[in-house]
Amino acid sequence: MSVFQYRDGQLFAEAVPIAHAADMVGTPFYCYSTAGLATEYRSFDGAFAKLPHLICYSLKANNNLAVMRTLADLGSGADVVSAGELHCALAAGVPADKIVFAGVGKTAPEMAAALDAGILQFNVESVPELELLNQVAVSKNKRAPVALRLNPDVDARTHAKISTGKSENKFGIELSRGAAAYARAAALPGVEPIGLALHIGSQLTDLAPYRAAFTKLADMARELQRSGLPLQRLDLGGGLGIAYDGDKPPSLADYAAVVEQTVGALGLPIIFEPGRRLIGNAGILVTRVIYVKEGVNRSFVITDAAMNDLIRPMLYEAYHDILPVRQAAPEAQSRRVDIVGPICESTDIFAEQRPMPPLAAGDLLAIFSTGAYGAVMASSYNLRPQAPEVMVNDHEFAIVRPRPTYADMIGRDRLPGWFSATAMTPDRRSAQ
């Protein structure tokens, strides 16, 4: 059951009226539900009760400190892809030995920071990365725990921009080169190979690609074991989808069955790296209608949120449910409108020809399933302050990332020296 529901004609987040939060915070803003996060985490964790496992929440989906802290308190680890995310996970209270560092382009300083922190493992995606990590580890008199990320050449059947397991993608080591790369890792003095990893994409709604990829991973694991190479665990990545447009993502029970049938017999501990599955439906973006503009052939609902706040519709042609915060009367007649933002770009569109009840300036709208890849992908394009983030816990709510002021934004810039003492008007220059 969704944590965002109508009560007496008003949309609530848990026990907090969205309209009240909007009055206090201003629009647009993101709103996350503690109960939604906790429910999704416990469901995911419970689905794998029969297998030794660790959930490492993927911070790239949403890196808000309060979100990570909520999950850390539930026992989650973290999957990070940058030094910034590493610092966020540690600041949120995630133990270093529950942190996995993934990503195709780790730098030497990032490797050094992760080694100093004592993380659980590096998911290494190429032999050059393996060699650099070895150099950094040797310089620190350490051994880096490494899982090699394999590219199984499996079509995830998801959007092309979020597919990561095909041979033409930049991610992972080709399966045919996996055994040699693992043997190379075992020969390096600064590396301790401990496992295999994969991640074939995001927003998967079909289990067949998982079955194919996990089967290939299991075959490689058995090959390594037969060769006498050490293998302590498997990392199965994340990517399990959520419902956006009426599609029905796989159940956790069915997903768990695929895992058990493909890699369960190996008896190895398993790492999972869900992101969207945990936070996606636990967040909404709240926006206010500025104008309703009647065009010749279309009607436009212009909101104070824009593509800089939520880029998914523009970038991925993504669908998000949009509902009025004040519930429409049963007899209200819907009509098709374009819901757009105020940015001077034709792509600043949240929905085209979407059936909506009558709307007017000042009305609040909630854009659903925006907890993942919403605020984390936002920008200040057009010098618009990024939307603040709010977290709800039962009847309480708090701003967990404030809206920057214009002074904050402009204050990031620095004028070069020639604009100070030497900056004079033409009249003053000629007088000298």
Image (spheres, helix red, strand yellow):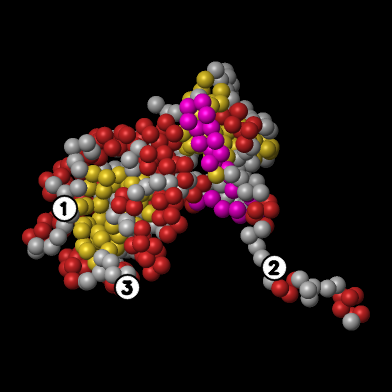
The answer to whether residue 355 is left or right of residue 250 is right
**Residue topped by disc 3:** 139
Q: Is residue 113 above or below residue 420?
A: above
Q: Position of residue 105 (x, y in %)?
A: 38, 65
Q: Earlier in the sequence, mark 3 or mark 2?
A: 3
Pick the front one: 269 or 289: 269
**Residue at x-position 64% and y-position 55%:** 409
Q: CA distance from mark 2 to mark 1?
A: 57 Å
Q: In terms of depth relative to the viewer, which is nearer, 138 or 86?
A: 138
Q: Residue at x 15, y 44 (%)?
A: 264
The residue type indicated by label 2 comes to Leu
Name the residue type under label 3.
Ser
- In the image, is residue 391 part of the stretch drawn in magenta? yes
As for residue 213 lying within the magenta part, the answer is no
C-alpha distance separating marks 3 and 1? 34 Å
**Disc 1 target residue:** 218
Task: State the residue in front, 384 or 52.
Answer: 52
Residue 51 in the image, given as x and y percentages of width and height = 19, 41
Where residue 22 sits, quadrant-wise, is top right
Name the residue beneath numbered marker 2.
415
Can residue 169 be seen at all in this image of the molecule?
no
| Disc nearest the viewer among 3 and 2 | 3
